[in-house]
Amino acid sequence: MKASVSWLSKIRHFYSNTTIAAPVTVLIVILVLFSLFVPKFFSFRSFSGIINAATLNGALAIGIAFLMVSGEFDLSVGSNLAISAYIYGNFSVAGQPFLGLIFALVVPALLGAVNGVILVWTGIPSFIVTLGTKYFYRGMLWVITTGSMLQTVDVLPMDKIFTGRLDLLNNLISEANFRNSLFWLLGLAFIFQIILGKTKFGNHVFSVGSNPGAALGQGVNVARVKILSFAISGLMAGVAGIFLFSQFHTVRVASGDGMDLYAIAAAVVGGTLITGGSGNIWGALVGALIISTLRTGVVLLNIPFIPADNFEAIVGVTIILAAILNMYISKRK
Amino acid sequence: MKKLNVLFAVFVVAMLLVTACQPKATPTPEVPVAPTTPPVEAPVGEAPLKLIMVQHALCAWDAFWCTVEDGIQTAAKDMGVEVTVLGPDKFDLEKTAALIDQAIAAQPDGIGLTVTDPVLFKEPIMKALAGGIPVLAYNAGKGPVADGIPYMTYLGMDEYQGGYQSGQRMIAAGGTRGVCINHQVGHAGLDLRCKGLIDAFKEAGKTAEVLGVKGEDAAQSQTTISDFYTANPEVDSFLTLGPSSANPFYAFVEASQPQNFKHITFDLTPEVEVAIKDGTTIAAVDQQPFLQGYGAVMYLVLNKRYGITPALPVTATGPGFITEELLGATVDPAKPLKLIMVQHALCAWDAFWCTVEDGIQTAAKNMGVEVTVLGPDKFDLEKTAALIDQAIAAQPDGIGLTVTDPVLFKEPIMKALAGGIPVLAYNAGKGPVADGIPYMTYLGMDEYQGGYQSGQRMIAAGGTRGVCINHQVGHAGLDLRCKGLIDAFKEAGKTAEVLGVKGEDAAQSQTTISDFYTANPEVDSFLTLGPSSANPFYAFVEASQPQNFKHITFDLTPEVEVAIKDGTTIAAVDQQPFLQGYGAVMYLVLRQRYGITPATAVTATGPGFITVDMLGK
């Protein structure tokens, strides 16, 4: 009897102290339920499809979660994604993929930092600042590209590294369609989780997010932390842009539009608090996977009155449920 | 200040990088309104072409045909081609069929004919098509689908529209209750005219009905009309379907002296001409035989020279409406004309528009008119509206424009119309009715037909179940494409459905398509509505390797071109921008020189289908 009580309390302790526990549990429950009840769901085709679908959203969500821990939002990541894809695409087509790679990361990071500078400088909430830059960045992209789509049918060798098919794995498992982007995502999540959880800078991000006044009092350079967090959010939008062009060889001015909100949804579903000061990079990735699993489940269920284009309703319910769960857990703390 | 400089520098660098090396890339046009690339280039250039037209009647012994032949010869002169018109010396279908054989033997570059008897003419037409000679029908026929002969198109009257637009005109004149006086109930064409009238009244919240009269007995018909009017004195709008009902109608008017009525009739006779002049009749509905002849030659030439195909199985040359104003106008084939086209984009900065402008300049050269193309130096609707004002100030003989913003453009367009300058829209617009601006017509893609004909092509290729992959559910044009596909499958006794994907997230879209295919493995026909859905579709094909599927997509991109060549994709649906430019100039010129008006509110320039054969040219 005593043993079982301690077992239960251990679980309780785990759930109230680890932000990632809840989303992982939700993901597992959904996966099990879908595997049992959704026809054709339990397959490597589905699993690899779910991961591939989360490629762009997952990359954005890593940066967004980092930024949200510092207490801010970034609605301009969708525009930054498109800018990055155009930069990488144009350089790649011109035979300069390495230069393209560098600029496609640096420019969105700088544009992200610009968001931070405006925020620190003016004190306007990040929601408003990035709402403005979201439209401004995309508007300027429209003007400069004259609305032209960029597409190439050339084979670009470097793309294999980012998003090529992971045939080593695919050949072993029938129907599987894993891509290299999987490793990049895992690697980036690992790095940013280390930065957030194990470094002094990460500590500062948490303290700025939970109580900026107190952080300032402890000598934390709040402005610097916020600007850098915005730069990271921009940087990850750059990564997403590179993924987009390297896999699909196509970018349009409208690419990534509205994905900012999906990324925020992934972070929230993944246990990151909207008020800042709490969150987890792995959680954001899991949040992106939950959203993409739900979509796959809905499509495979083939319910006539919930077509895939009505999927937004399900994402909406998921966000609210996740927020309730997060609130409940943080209160128990 | 320092911070501001830094911000500015970052932005400038960012935007420079976005455009870095752009020319080497392969950009294709995109939203707002120009979603396709130039189609195939002119296959043969302006080679001297030889066409043969075979008719079941000739100007030599039937005056009606003089107008048709005038259209043919005018087009031949405009386009610099040699046209021979063949026909029997009296009505003789056997002889006409023999003339088709004779035409084929001469190996012309195209044949136009009147399909008076589809059963008798099928064999010779199939022979011509098998020999690679393009064939189209004019004046007589029902279209390739109804006739069961795969010729290009049939140029003739849209009977339904004849009745429908007559109804609209009578309602606009104050009509409240209508009657369609049908002298041959059961005749498909005449019944369609009545259906059009009734629908127009119904849409306006009013009623109209059919009154059958015996066309062979004028006296009986007059009494029937009179009795009907006595029983229904509230009827004030009368449509007669030809001389057989118009003639007893005029007798009724003379005898019964009804007051405040509106009358429109089909076909212009001397009696109708007098009635239009004295105000008894609003207009005569005309099938515009000149346009039948002109259009037949034009489409054959455009097909041969530029790979253009007519968008619809039936290309409406009528209804045209002959009003008092038009009766007074004089036909002047040599009238020097100055036209101005105002576009929201230009070839100078958007490659898509080079094809449109090429169409404009080719038509201008062919028809011997002076055309100026105006447009802003970047996407700027305010400036475009200002250019319309500038165009009006120049007092041209016609203005063509892209109605990108009907609210903003309404005022300047109304000003032009008030000044007596004919106006039409091309490439962007929804038609005079939907835009709420009474310009002549809108030349652009028929979205519904794009989906419908794609469905027919996939079914013909063996497709049994279809899906329309829509990257922007709720977009009126894209939804219409899907509706067309679904209707085509439904008509063939098969099913098709819509799959919504998120066009902004290609990775998500690919997985959604893959999931849908897993849940519905019997789906074998995929329609994608543009690069935003075609691109993830190709990623799905590469990853999931579906077998034996059929795929058609809208808009030709480099990726689609490769897919058509390697057999992944059957065809790309094209809005035929060349025809938009060419047609805009042509209709303005025909209006000014011959009083021709476009038959329908929307004149379809697309869908055209770019297949592997056309890419090869």
Image (cartoon, rainbow, N blue to C red):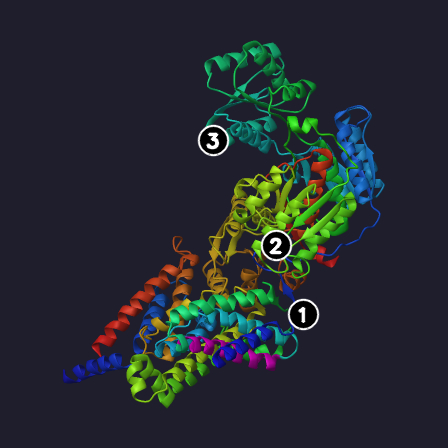
Q: Badge 2 is on which residue?
A: B344
Residue A183 placed where, x, y %? Answer: 48, 81
- Chain at numbered mark 3: B
State the separation of the CA atoms marked 1 and 3. Answer: 55 Å
Residues in magenta? A97-119
Specify the quadrant of the image occupied by residue B246.
top right
What amino acid type should be assigned to the residue bearing mark 1? Pro
Residue B149 placed where, x, y %? Answer: 68, 40
Q: Badge 3 is on which residue?
A: B202
A54 in the magenta segment: no
Earlier in the chain: of badge 3 and badge 2, it is: 3
State the separation of the CA atoms marked 1 and 2. Answer: 22 Å
Earlier in the chain: of badge 1 and badge 2, it is: 1
What amino acid type should be assigned to the residue bearing mark 3? Lys
What amino acid type should be assigned to the residue bearing mark 2? His
Does the residue at mark 3 contact the one at mark 2 (Cβ under 8 Å)?
no
Q: Nearer the viewer, residue B606 or A84?
A: A84
Q: Is residue B56 visible?
A: no
Q: Badge 1 is on which residue?
A: B23
Q: Is residue B127 visible?
A: yes
Name, please, the residue furthest toward the left.
A1
Compared with A316, B309 (above or below) is above
In this rendering, do the residues under marks 1 and 3 share a single chain? yes
Compared with B425, A271 (above or below) is below
Residue B494 placed where, x, y %? Answer: 52, 47
